[in-house]
Image: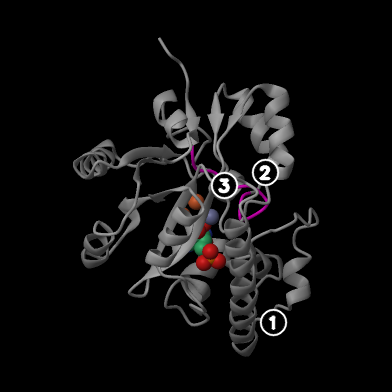
Amino acid sequence: MNSFRADLHCHTTCSDGSMTPTQLVELAVELGLSGLSITDHDSIGAYATAMPVAAAHGLELLSGVEFSAAHEGSAVHVLAYGFSLTNPLIHDFCRQHVLRRKERNRAIMDLLTKQGFPISEKELYLLDSSLEEDKSWGRPHIAQAMVKKGFVKSSDEAFKKYIGDGKSAFVAGKTFSVAETLQLIHEANGYAVLAHPMLIERQSVARDLMNLPFDGIEAYYARYPIDKQLYWKRIAEEKGWIVTGGSDFHGNLKPNISLGCSWVDEVTFKKLKQKKI
Ligand code: AMP
Ligand code: ZN
Ligand code: FE
Ligand code: FE
């Protein structure tokens, strides 16, 4: 029996994961995974460190990133795989996201300050002493800063009361459309995969997305009920798209999700590693 398993969705300290790229690769090896794609939010910063560690342990890496996009006001995450890690389009797009996030974080913190919860940029960026390069800072870090300052008891409370979508200190900021994100990924010779389709709340959004030129759907996701996963697997197969899977591991930021709890086999992993024709 082929025991190859690859987790195609996980986060490090380069976005909102709690493990460094080195720790994550070592955990994947420890768990017996054969392949891994690190998909930080809007950042490929983990790869510079992860690549030599993975090579030393014989773990195969697939290039990946999880881009934030929006459709009709709803957040949509798009996974990109198989692009060259030196592709200038990908680097430039990640840079644009860093700028977008900086502006947006500032606007969210301004609103929080007005509401009696002052957090400065300095306090936010000093939160993590690891100072990863090309790190994507976002709402999970603002939530952690709120906990640290005693404004809320947990990150969940910060999202539920203040910074979650539509709450009093929520700011959407600049967004990129799903269509332009797909175009960029394709220009960079990557595969574009719809992340966690079961999290899409509006039917109309799901319908529209199914008419966009995705290459795959992340049907195997985290610990979702198998009937939901099979529903999306069937849709992907009807469309002739690749069925992908991953845990969306964030370390102790999502403690009930373990690395490798969703995965793909060797055939899918190798296909995504192949150059697109
Ligand atoms: P951002 O990319 O800055 O908009 O932050 C969105 C990220 O926040 C998501 O990808 C989740 O990882 C995280 N998130 C969303 N809702 C919650 C919540 N209720 N509690 C904790 N984290 C959340
Ligand atoms: Zn995340
Ligand atoms: Fe996501
Ligand atoms: Fe994710």
Q: Nearer the viewer, residue 112 or 41?
A: 41
> Disc 1 marks which amino acid?
Pro
Q: Label 1, on which residue?
A: 118
Quarter of the rendering occupied by the C terminus: top left
Q: Secondary structure at mark 3?
A: loop
Q: Measured along the vertical axis of the image, is residue 234 above or below residue 158? A: above
Q: Which residues are magenta?
A: 8-17
Q: Earlier along the polypeptide chain: callout 2 or callout 1? A: 2
Q: Is residue 152 visible?
A: no
Q: Earlier along the polypeptide chain: callout 1 or callout 3? A: 1
Quarter of the rendering occupied by the N terminus: top left
Q: Label 2, on which residue?
A: 47
Q: Position of residue 238 (x, y in %)?
A: 19, 42
Q: Label 3, on which residue?
A: 250
Quick one: label 3, few (<14), some, or many (20+) residues within 10 Å? many
Displayed quadrant of residue 206:
bottom left
